[in-house]
Amino acid sequence: MRGKLEHPRGLIELISVEVERIDPEYSELWLSFEYTCPGGQYKSAMVLPIGNSKDMVNFFFKELIAEAKHLSEIEKNDALSVGLFVSNKTDTMLTIKNLCQRVIEVLNTDEDLSENREFIDLCTSGFHFKDPSKSLSSMDFDDRYRIFMSRATEKMSQGYYTIAADDLEKANILCSTSPLIHKLLGVCHRELGHLDLAIDMFNEALDLGDREKETYLYLSEIYFFLNEMENAKDVLLEMLDEYPDDVRATVELANIEYQLDRDYLPLLDKAFSKDPDLTKNVIMQTFVFKKVGGGKKNRIPIEEASRLVGIPAHAIRQLAQSNRIPVRAFPDNDELVLDENELKAWAQVYRRYNLLADDLERTETQQGGDTHQGMALLS
C-alpha cells in the first residue's frame, strides 16, 4: 500500500473573482479571477455559458483546475501521481454559485438592463476571498467608481490599454454621463487602433460637455489620418470657438487647409503673430507636408530637388534620413521618393518662419544619431 507522501497533491487557492461582462445576447458570463497554484500566482479570465448555477460553478472549477495544471506544467500523466485541488473551494463555491444564480434571475426579468440596479451591481461586483475589505460587492457605487477609475488610469500609464478599457467600461456602467470616462475610453481605443470606437467615444465626451483642448485635438487628429478632412476641420472650428487664440488648433487647421489644396498660410501667419516660438515648435512637431489622400505624385530626383529649394543634395539626404522633409521610402528600394509640390510647400513654410536654417544646423549636429526621430507624423 502506498503512503500519502507517494501521492503529493498540488494546492490551488482562489484569491478573487470579478464579473467582467454579462452578455445577454450570447448567454455568457465573463469572469476574471486571481489564484495561486504550484506554477505561481496568476490573473486570468473565463467565459461561463449561462445555464443553471450548479453547472456554471462546476464548469468554473473544472476549467480553473485545468488551467492551473497547464501553468504548473503538470501533464496528464498518471505516472506523476500529482493532482490539483482548490484548497478553499468550500469557502468560495457558494459565493460563486450565488453570483451565477443572481445573473440568471436578472436576465429572466423584463426590466431594461441598463436601468436595472441589480444588473449594474452584478456587472461591477467582485469578491476577494483573502481580504473581504477588498471585495467590490461590499462597497457602494461611488466607491466602486473611484476604484475602477483609479485602476484604469494606472493601467493606462503602464500602457495596458485593453485592461484599462475594461475597467473604464465598468465605471461607465456606474456613471454613464461622465465625459471623462468617454474621453479616456477614446484614448484607449485610439492607442489600440480602434479608430471608429475612439471617434465615437470622443464625440460622446464632447456631447456630454467635455471642453478640454486635448479632446478636440485627439478627435481631429483621428479624422485627419483617416483623410476625413472636413470632419477634422469642423472639430477644430468648434475648438476655436471655445479657444479662439489657441496656436496648436490654428496650425492644425492650416494643415487641413493645406491637405485640401486651399490657402493655408494666412492661418500660419495668424498663429505666428500670437506666439512665434510655439508656432515654430508645432509646425516642426505636427505639420504633415505629405498628402494624406495620396494621388498622383510629381517625382523628382534629389539633384533636381536640390536646385528647386536651394539646399545641397547631401543636406537633403540627411534631412530625409532624419525624416525632417516630406519623403517616401520603400522597403525593397533604397531610393528616396520626393514630390515636387510637397517639397516646395515644405521649403516655403520653413523659410517663411525661419525654420530652415535651424533645421539644417540641427541635422548637421545630429548626423549619425537616431535617424527615426520624428517619423511618427511624417510616415
Image: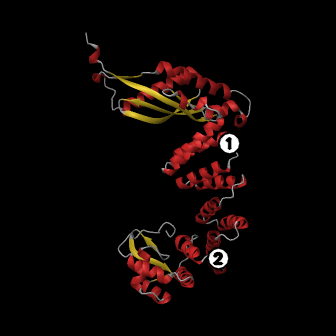
Q: Residue at x 50, y 82 (%)?
A: 356
Q: Position of residue 180 (x, y in %)?
A: 64, 50
Q: Where's the N terminus, which quadrant?
A: top left
Relative horizontal placement of residue 253, taking residue 322 as reference (left or right): right
Relative horizontal placement of residue 241, taking residue 320 as reference (left or right): right
Colour pattern: secondary structure
Q: Which residue is mark 1?
A: 175
The answer for how far apart the CA atoms under marks 2 and 1 are is: 40 Å
What amino acid type should be assigned to the residue bearing mark 2? Lys
Q: Assess disc 1: are there few (<14), some (14-19) or many (≥20) residues with their C-alpha within 10 Å of its C-alpha.
A: some
Up/down of 364 relative to 248, above or below: below
Residue 204 in view, yes or no? yes
Q: Position of residue 143 (x, y in %)?
A: 62, 37
Relative horizontal placement of residue 130, taking residue 9 as reference (left or right): right
What amino acid type should be assigned to the residue bearing mark 1? Cys
Q: Residue at x 57, y 70 (%)?
A: 292
Q: Position of residue 173 (x, y in %)?
A: 65, 40
Numbered label attached to residue 262: none
Q: Which residue is mark 2?
A: 274
Q: Quadrant of residue 114?
A: top right
Residue 51 in view, yes or no? no
Labels 2 and 1: the sequence-earlier one: 1
